[in-house]
Image: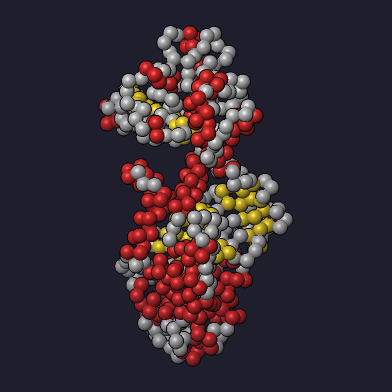
């Protein structure tokens, strides 16, 4: 990228090296780089040898020479260090995290031994000397090492395929000490092989979990905690999103999935096919190498490939599955929402806690108006804050429980004819949600979807009476945030003609295709937008787009 003001930065890096011998050698080489100095290479083997520059100045004067900050190009630096493989070693110090402990040295040595230049000193480097070098380079200025960039995937794939271990990425917690007691963390178990899906193709990786024995806290890549109290997110988001025990996904992948859904109505299945086909057609090198690696060293993602055989689950790891994208997307969206609401300390004890957290977030959303910060003059001219437009979008529907709850809202004078739908999601293959399933079973009602549909057609009156005794469960008003509005303005229920329009009197074509649906579905969503286009609030619609719902939602 052009010339770099390197000498001052390299000087600080060299001064941070504890070993006096290596410090002198590094300063000498930097002096060669700046001034073209030359000296007898044999003097490197003598710790106390006098090292001089090209003009006869001793090594002690090198810092003065470097203070001139003479700009140098990167090419001579790479050429100089490549001869001794220092460039690769420095990169590997950054590539393999320090919290891999003793395994770190072995991983670095494996990658270095396969990629070193023939005839180099590094080719016969003893393990003890390598440990010293890694420790010395680890203490160098990170800004200095960062200038060298990452290790190329070509070098990493060479080591991965020859050694049979996934060296392309190393996943570990972002900390070395316990956040509770400050003690050193230890490896909880041996590293696990996982697959990471990125825009550059799928990459095999090793994942390390650390543990503080004193506090009984496990530190995973994306969360920390224990099985008893639960796990929570770190203060800073990680680059990869957890999809399953053995699969991770780039965060930008989730951002792209959201944008594709907004503008292209792309499903998880479509996104998976787009990714896989683009990798196949472009003959992506990471994709091809991943297939080679999995043939010899399979990573079992059977839980993501439930429709396939075990053999396919092992060999298809190079291709991403729709379930992997779906899990990663929901985990990403939930984490982002928790951080936005300052709830990143939310504890996840069980897998089902994700659904509980999403329900909690939805309850907050139902009673919240989205903030509109820094409104511009152009936005105000369009009527922002004065003009509001409300409408329903019938395309965004989802199935709900078929249990009917009372229309009459208790505690008020009169009765408000409101929606009688249970807003909860039904159990898979069943007509009711989990709570209403138990109640319907106790009443002897059929609970499977098709059986209850046939039953309700023959006994319409019985179906209407179902649930009249149940007034404790979630109602549509709770999900829409209108229950609080009714409590604040109880006289609303005394108004005439505030009920829902009966379906039998509806003349619009909103029922088109309804006869083909077995389940009960929502009527889409209600949206309130300001004149400038900012969405103030949205809520689900139930049964119909009737005046009672629209009025109460607008008032809320």
Give above or below for 367 relative to 306. above
User: Relative to residue 199, is residue 459 drawn left or right?
Assistant: right
- Towards the viewer: 88 or 539: 539
111 sits left or right of 530 in the view: right
In this picture the colour scheme is: secondary structure
Looking at the image, can residue 66 be seen? no
User: Can residue 158 be seen from the camera position used here?
Assistant: yes
Task: Please name whichever residue, 497 or 132, is drawn nearer the observer in this view of the structure.
Answer: 497
Which quadrant would residue 359 be assigned to in this image? top right
Q: Residue 545's x, y, as percent?
A: 39, 23
Where 492 sits versus 371, above or below? above
What residue is drawn where x is 53% and y is 62%?
A: 310
Please tell me which residue is depicted at 49% across the width and 11% down the height of the picture.
Answer: 493
Residue with the most extreme front position: 458
As drawn, is 104 to the left or to the right of 505?
right
Residue 206 place in picture, x, y as percent: 54, 65
Q: Is residue 514 above or below residue 56?
A: above
Q: Pick whichever, 19 or 556, lies toward us.
A: 556
Q: Front-most of 259 and 63?
A: 259
x, y percentage for residue 283? 34, 67
Residue at horizontal 44 percent and vertical 68 percent from the top? 291
| Tally of numbered discs | 0
**Quarter of the image containing the N terminus?**
bottom left
Instruction: Spot the residue most to the right.
Output: 214
Quarter containing the C terminus: top left
37 vs 514: above or below: below
Question: At x 53% / y 88%, what residue is drawn?
Answer: 45
| Percent x, y of residue 37 | 39, 84
């Amino acid at each position: 990228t052009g010339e770099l003001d390197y000498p001052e930065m390299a000087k600080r890096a060299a001064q941070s090296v504890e070993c006096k011998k290596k410090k002198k050698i590094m300063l000498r080489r930097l002096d060669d780089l700046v001034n073209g100095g030359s000296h007898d290479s044999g003097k490197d083997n003598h710790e106390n040898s006098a090292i001089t520059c090209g003009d006869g100045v001793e090594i002690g004067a090198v810092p003065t020479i470097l203070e001139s900050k003479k700009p140098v190009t990167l090419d001579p630096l790479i050429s100089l260090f490549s001869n001794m493989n220092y460039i690769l070693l420095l990169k590997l110090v950054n590539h393999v995290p320090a919290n891999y402990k003793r395994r770190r040295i072995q991983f670095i040595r494996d990658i270095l031994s396969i990629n070193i230049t023939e005839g180099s000193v590094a080719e016969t480097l003893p393990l003890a000397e390598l440990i010293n070098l890694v420790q010395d380079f680890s203490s160098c200025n990170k800004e200095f090492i960062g200038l060298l960039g990452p290790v190329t995937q070509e070098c990493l794939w060479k080591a991965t395929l020859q050694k049979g271990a996934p060296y392309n990425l190393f996943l570990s917690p972002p900390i070395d000490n316990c956040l509770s007691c400050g003690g050193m963390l230890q490896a909880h178990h041996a590293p696990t092989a996982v697959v990471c899906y990125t825009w550059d193709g799928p990459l095999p990786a090793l994942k390390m979990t650390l543990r503080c024995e004193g506090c009984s806290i496990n530190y995973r890549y994306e969360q920390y905690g224990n099985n008893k109290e639960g796990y929570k997110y770190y203060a800073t988001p990680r680059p990869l999103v957890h999809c399953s025990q053995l699969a991770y996904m780039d965060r930008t992948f989730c951002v792209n999935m959201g944008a594709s859904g907004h503008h292209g109505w792309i499903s998880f299945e479509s996104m998976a096919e787009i990714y896989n086909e683009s990798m196949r057609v472009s003959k992506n090198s990471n994709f091809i190498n991943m297939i080679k690696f999995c043939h010899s060293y399979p990573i079992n993602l059977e839980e993501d490939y439930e429709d396939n055989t075990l053999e396919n689950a092992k060999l298809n790891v190079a291709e991403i599955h729709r379930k992997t994208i779906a899990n990663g997307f929901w985990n990403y969206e939930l984490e982002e929402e928790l951080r936005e609401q300052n709830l990143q300390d939310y504890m996840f004890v069980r897998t089902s806690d994700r659904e509980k957290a999403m329900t909690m977030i939805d309850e907050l959303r139902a009673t919240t108006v989205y903030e509109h910060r820094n409104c511009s003059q152009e936005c105000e001219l369009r009527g922002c804050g004065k003009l509001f437009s409300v409408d329903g979008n019938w395309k965004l529907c989802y199935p709900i429980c078929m249990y009917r709850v009372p229309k009459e809202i208790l505690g008020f004078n009169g009765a408000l004819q409101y929606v009688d739908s249970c807003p909860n999601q039904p159990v898979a293959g069943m007509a009711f949600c989990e709570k209403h399933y138990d109640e319907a079973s106790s009443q002897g009602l059929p609970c499977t979807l098709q059986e209850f549909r046939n039953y309700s057609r023959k006994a319409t009156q019985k179906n209407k009476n179902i649930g009249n005794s149940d007034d404790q469960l979630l109602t549509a008003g709770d999900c829409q945030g209108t229950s609080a509005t009714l409590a604040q303005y109880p006289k609303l229920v005394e108004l005439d003609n505030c009920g829902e329009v009966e379906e039998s009197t509806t003349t619009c074509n909103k029922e088109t295709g309804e006869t083909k649906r077995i389940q009960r579905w929502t009527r889409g969503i209600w949206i309130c937008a300001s004149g400038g286009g900012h969405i103030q609030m949205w809520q689900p619609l139930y049964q119909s787009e009737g005046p009672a719902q629209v009025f109460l939602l607008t008032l809320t």
